[in-house]
Amino acid sequence: MARPTFNELEAFRAVASKRSFRQAADAMGVSRSALSHTIIALEKTLGVRLLNRTTRSVSPTEAGQRLLQLLEPALRELDTALDQLADDRGAPNGTLRINANKAAATWLLSHVVPYFLRQYPGVELDLVSEGRLVDIVRDGFDAGVRLADAIPQDMIAMPLCGPTRFVAVAAPAYLAGRKPPATPEDLRHHACIRQRLPSGKRYFWEFSRNDQELSIDVPGPLSLDDNGLMVQAAVNGLGIAYVPESFASSDLRSGQLVTVLTDWCPPIPGLALYYPGYRHVPSTLRAFIETIKRHRHSA
């Protein structure tokens, strides 16, 4: 029997793991059409159907699931061996994929990425910025960056920066003639700039003071999906926004915005890099971690 190529097996692993031709093609840097032809060629070589395909989904067949279970450890060992060869060459080489939200990506671009790319020219950094929480292992990322309290318990986490906090902000013009909210419940009588999450759901504003915690589904005529736009809407007097303090800091300094409910907005753990501890850490990620350790205190 003819033997499948390494590229065909990698392609199958990507599609079967992600259960999506689009996501697998994006991760591999190929077109969906090329990836589909690769899978068809692999199935023809093996003489068995590996994937169930519909217009909405893709999933491994029973034979495909068995092949995936056998391939995963073998390809991980191969990745480890190739990575150790990179160590022998003395410099990391290859692609490093990191998933982050916009705030985290902005922080990395300011404080880590310039130093990293200068020191390791053989590494291609693929920094994917999106708001939704993803399974970094399933989606093919080496690491992720999120707020520390949103990181899964089975991951290794390394703090990037100190505590942060969300703040409720409004323009003085909006508050003029209105009674500022004294408690989170008072927000029900204000125009709030609501946030729509990547899942489509609206974010419930979360507040805490002493041992009391509140989650409020605030009212408001405007919903946005970007912190920067929410700040701009607040500056324009459209209502109260609830955003990471870093997004509003310049407008707070200039007086275009003021905070409300300050004593209900305590600091929370800041950003952290996280990655699975049960598998080999590639040399590219180890180099990125060392760069963070050298430069995070200058942030």
Image (cartoon, helix red, strand yellow):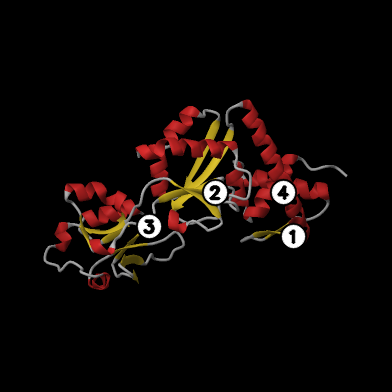
Q: Earlier in the sequence, mark 2 or mark 4?
A: 4
Image quadrant where one finds the N terminus:
top right
Report, in whole angstroms, how far the alpha carbon at label 3 lies from the one at label 4. 39 Å
Q: Do the residues labelled 2 and 4 touch (CB within 8 Å)?
A: no
> Residue 196, percent across and down?
39, 62
Q: In this view, does 299 lie to the left or right of 75?
A: left
Calculate the distance from the C-alpha at mark 4 to the C-alpha at mark 1. 19 Å
Residue type at numbered disc 2: Tyr
Task: Identify the residue under disc 2.
Answer: 275
**Mark 2 or mark 3: whose residue is earlier in sequence:** 3
Quarter of the rendering containing residue 135: bottom right
Relative horizontal placement of residue 108, taking residue 135 as reference (left or right): left
Left or right: residue 114 compared with residue 156: left
For badge 4, the amino acid type reads Pro
Q: Which amino acid does label 1 sit on?
A: Thr
In the picture, the disc for residue 61 is: 1
| Residue 218: x %, y % from top left | 31, 69
* Distance in Å between CA atoms under marks 1 and 3: 38 Å
Q: Where is mark 4, residue-wise?
A: 73
Mark 3 sits on what residue? Answer: 225
Cα separation between marks 2 and 3: 27 Å
Residue at 41% across / 47% down in the picture?
104
